[in-house]
Image (cartoon, rainbow, N blue to C red):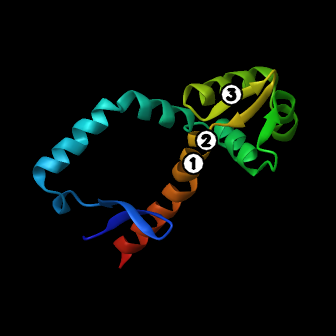
Amino acid sequence: MKLKLQLVRNGKVVSEIPLSPTDWPRHQLENEFNAFEQHFRRFSKIFSALSNETRLRMMRRLVEEESGTMSFADFMRDLDLNPKTVWENSRKLRDGGFLRKTSRGKYSCSDIGETTFLMMSLALSRLLESLEEVERL
């Protein structure tokens, strides 16, 4: 299978990743896996932050918000959450690098958090759908 994932900025390929181990030179694949292991804690925080439906709903709501900022009370009201749930989940999202506290009780996405959320939710979903389609062919 000769599938590749490309990251393109302004029409220029920034990164290209083969999606089959046989398409990688052996030493390069080992180097990539070693690099992945070095970043394991970071990835673990990202996956942990997004492994909960409430946190996914909070991030979605924040990304959809025109002002890019929501208050603690907004999360409670818009998502029908209790204060403890908002506090615990906002902390987990901050720990994962997705949220930043902008002022007392106000939150916004971190720059990398918003991009990571879109990549992990929308792009990953589309990628999996595409891979399943290729598998059926």
Residue that badge 3 annotates: 90
The image quadrant of residue 86 is top right
Q: Is residue 126 above or below residue 41?
A: below
**What is the three-letter code of the residue carrying label 2?**
Asp
The image quadrant of residue 128 is bottom left
Could you tell me how far apart the alpha carbons at marks 1 and 3 are, in whole angstroms?
Answer: 17 Å
Could you tell me how far apart the alpha carbons at marks 2 and 1 are, in whole angstroms?
Answer: 7 Å
Looking at the rendered structure, the secondary structure element under dot 2 is helix
First along the sequence among labels 1 and 3: 3
Q: Is residue 76 above or below residue 88?
A: below
Residue found farthest to the left: 26
User: What numbered label is drawn on residue 115?
Assistant: 1
**What is the three-letter code of the residue carrying label 3?**
Ser
User: What numbered label is drawn on residue 111?
Assistant: 2
Q: Which residue does the image show at 72% across and 36% down from the upper left? A: 108
Task: Tell which tag, 1 or 3, sits nearer the viewer.
Answer: 1
**What is the three-letter code of the residue carrying label 1?**
Thr
Q: Is residue 76 left or right of residue 109?
A: right
Task: Tell which tag, 2 or 1, sits nearer the viewer.
Answer: 2
User: What numbered label is drawn on residue 16?
Assistant: none
Using a 10 Å C-alpha cutoff, classify the residue at mark 2 as few (fewer than 14 neighbours), some (14 to 19) or many (20 or more).
Answer: few
Marks 2,1: beta carbons within 8 A: yes
